[in-house]
Image (cartoon, helix red, strand yellow):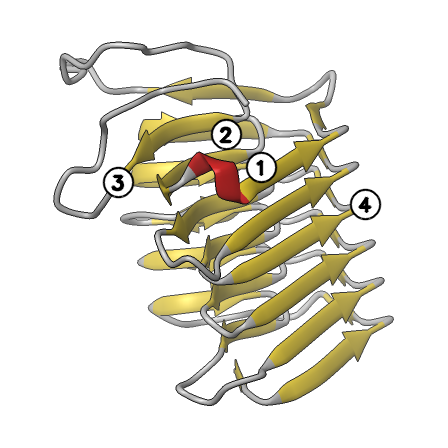
Amino acid sequence: GWATATNNIKNCINDGMIVGTENIGGFVGTFGSTEEEEKLTISNCINKTNITAENNVGGIIGYSVGETCNIENCINEGNITANNDNAGGIAGSVYEKFTVKNCYNQGDITAKANMAGPIIGRADLSKETAFLTGYNCLGNGKVTAVLFAGYFIGGIYGDLSRTKIEKCSLGENGSWDETSTEFPNYSNYTYGSYVGGVGVSDLDPVVLYANI
């Protein structure tokens, strides 16, 4: 569903069937609107079901655009698939201030186009108020995208200084792969990073590949 204003979701398990096309998550599809001072906290929740949609698909939340979103002590056990872009074990696509702590993914994560990560598919940090925090998260399962597969997040747009990722890792059963056979010719590409791809805008999506 759609969450606005201030909400807290805790101590929940999802093992039912979820059907949708855009912005689909195990507990929240979309968080945020045009209102100010929106805050969502999801804690101690487990998603057990497989989820498939077109874009912005996550085991816990699909699409976060509200001012502040915190995901804590959550687990995704289902396989998460975006038929196009942005698949994440915890979150599909995030904006503004987003924090994920003590979370674990063990499902396979697939973006049939771009941006897949065991924790987050895509983050847009282009606004000055945006900030991404990741702490003590573990990704297992297989992560696959045509482009931009990372072992914490698939892709970031905007300023990398607006990130703080600590004590996050890929589990012993985890793997990630980019399947493109015609990789674009950009410099500074490093394979094996927290972040699959980094860019400055949707119009110029790949100007740097980097480790954090």
Around disc 2, counting alpha carbons within 10 Å, would you say few (fewer than 14), some (14 to 19), or many (20 or more)?
A: many
Residue position marked by numbered label 4 in the rendering? 102
- Residue at the (12%, 45%) spot, across then down: 203
Residue named by callout 3: 200
Residue 180: which quarter of the image?
A: top left
Q: Is residue 124 left or right of residue 182?
A: right
| Distance from the alpha carbon under mark 1 to that under mark 2 | 6 Å
| Mark 1 in CB contact with mark 4 (< 8 angstroms) | no
Chain-order first, disc 1 or disc 4: 4
94 left or right of 200?
A: right
Q: Give residue 15's position: percent from left, percent from top.
A: 71, 65
x and y, in percent, of residue 91 in the image: 55, 54
Q: Nearer the viewer, residue 142 or 167?
A: 167
Q: Amino acid at mark 1?
A: Pro
* Label 1, label 4: how far apart the Cα atoms are: 13 Å
Helix, strand or loop at mark 2 = strand
Q: Nearer the viewer, mark 3 or mark 2?
A: 3
Q: Residues within 10 Å of mark 3 (few under 14, many from 20)?
A: some
Kindly identify the amino acid type of the residue bearing the numbered disc 3. Val
53 relative to 124, above or below: below
Q: Can you identify the residue that label 2 sits on?
A: 143
Q: Which residue is mark 1?
A: 118
Q: CA distance from mark 4 to mark 2?
A: 19 Å
Judge depth for marks 3 and 4 and give the one in front: 3
Compared with 10, 162 (above or below) is above
Three-letter code, disc 2 = Val
Discs 4/2, front: 4
Query: Are discs 3 and 2 less than 8 Å apart at CB?
Result: no
- As helix, strand or loop, the secondary structure at mark 4 comes to loop
